[in-house]
Amino acid sequence: MTAVLFFVFGAASIAGALGVVLSENPVHSALFLVQTLMSVAVLFLIQDAELVAAVQVIVYAGAIVVLFLFVIMLLGVDRREALTETLRFQRPIALALGAVLLAEIVYLAGHRWATGAHTARGVPIEGGDFGNNIERVARVLFTDFLWPFQLTAVLLVIAVVGSVSLARRSGERPDGVASTGEETAS
Amino acid sequence: MIAALDITPNFYLVLAALLFTIGTVGVLIRRNVIVMFMSVELMLNAVNLTFVAFARALDDTAGQVIVFFTLVVAAAEVAVGLAIIVAIFRRRRGATADDLTVLKG
């Protein structure tokens, strides 16, 4: 059963990833990205990571893809530019480098490159007296990883302030907006 | 036949390698900056899959916790990156990599 689920949703995630890269319309790319994210969420579920799977669906497929679609809607990027290449050898070299990268990672995946050492408290995935998956994750997050958790708060504040200051138009007259809309439409 | 197959962590690692490579090639061959960002999301997701596979293999929940930090970084990156795209689009009337040739000598 697990094997069937793995192959079905693994193939779905690969197909979605290829769709993201190969489709000409950015909206189609975003929808293929949702397919990949959902398939990976199922793969998380198979591996007893229920909370991570739920957060994957809610945050990635729910929030991040909607943000992508918002920007696509805002900018109206529907020019069919993407699959014509301007640099001469860009595409063959990119494919060759991708093949080399794949060979390297698959080679690494076939070898033991993790030490097997556990974190300080070493809460196991299942078994022991630690409760369900959410309680286990919370126990690790708020003990061993408390300092990184605080740092993510700082990171999010920086990201919010940065994106607001990037997105506001400073010292620009409002009638600049109208000319932008006309040139995009033409 | 397939149902009897034992799925070891290596299966997940190879799948994550494939997803990561597709994301990398997507960043390299696409000209549309938004699609390049989606490819970066693919790469981050492949890494998340690796973390969860190792959490299962080593029986340690910390691998799943790291996924949350990756998620936060991805969200912050998308927010800032899309703000940059909007700023570029406002200035240059286009959002492909070919529009960003200001530093070209």
Image: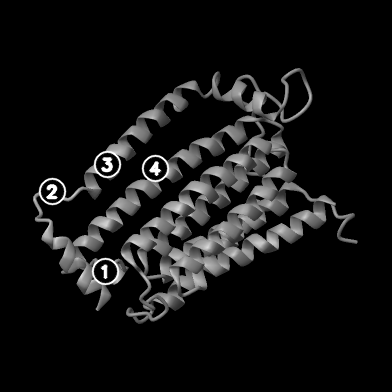
Q: Position of residue A11 (x, y in %)?
A: 69, 63
Circle nearer the viewer, 3 or 2: 2
How far, Cα to Cα, is label 4 from label 1?
23 Å
Circle nearer the viewer, 2 or 4: 2
Q: Is residue B100 left or right of residue A93?
A: left
Along the line of sight, the residue nearer the viewer: A130 or A121: A130
Residue picked out by circle 2: A170
- Identify which amino acid the numbered label 3 is placed on: Gly
The subunit carrying tag 2 is A
Q: Is residue A183 left or right of residue B72?
A: left
Find numbered disc 2 in the image and state the secondary structure of the residue it sits on.
Answer: loop
- Identify which amino acid the numbered label 2 is placed on: Ser
Residue B65 drawn above or below residue B93: above
- Identify which amino acid the numbered label 1 is placed on: Gly
Find numbered disc 1 in the image and state the secondary structure of the residue it sits on.
Answer: loop
Residue drawn at x 60%, y 24% as measured from the top left: A138
Q: Position of residue A51 (x, y in %)?
A: 64, 35
- Badge 2 and badge 4 in a common chain: no
The subunit carrying tag 1 is B
- Badge 3 and badge 1 in a common chain: no
Residue drawn at x 67%, y 43% as measured from the top left: B53
Residue picked out by circle 3: A162
Residue B102 seen anywhere in this rendered image of the structure: no
How far, Cα to Cα, is label 3 from label 1?
22 Å
Q: Residues within 10 Å of mark 3 (few under 14, many from 20)?
A: some
Q: Residues within 10 Å of mark 2 (few under 14, many from 20)?
A: few
- Identify which amino acid the numbered label 4 is placed on: Ala
Residue picked out by circle 4: B76
Residue picked out by circle 1: B94
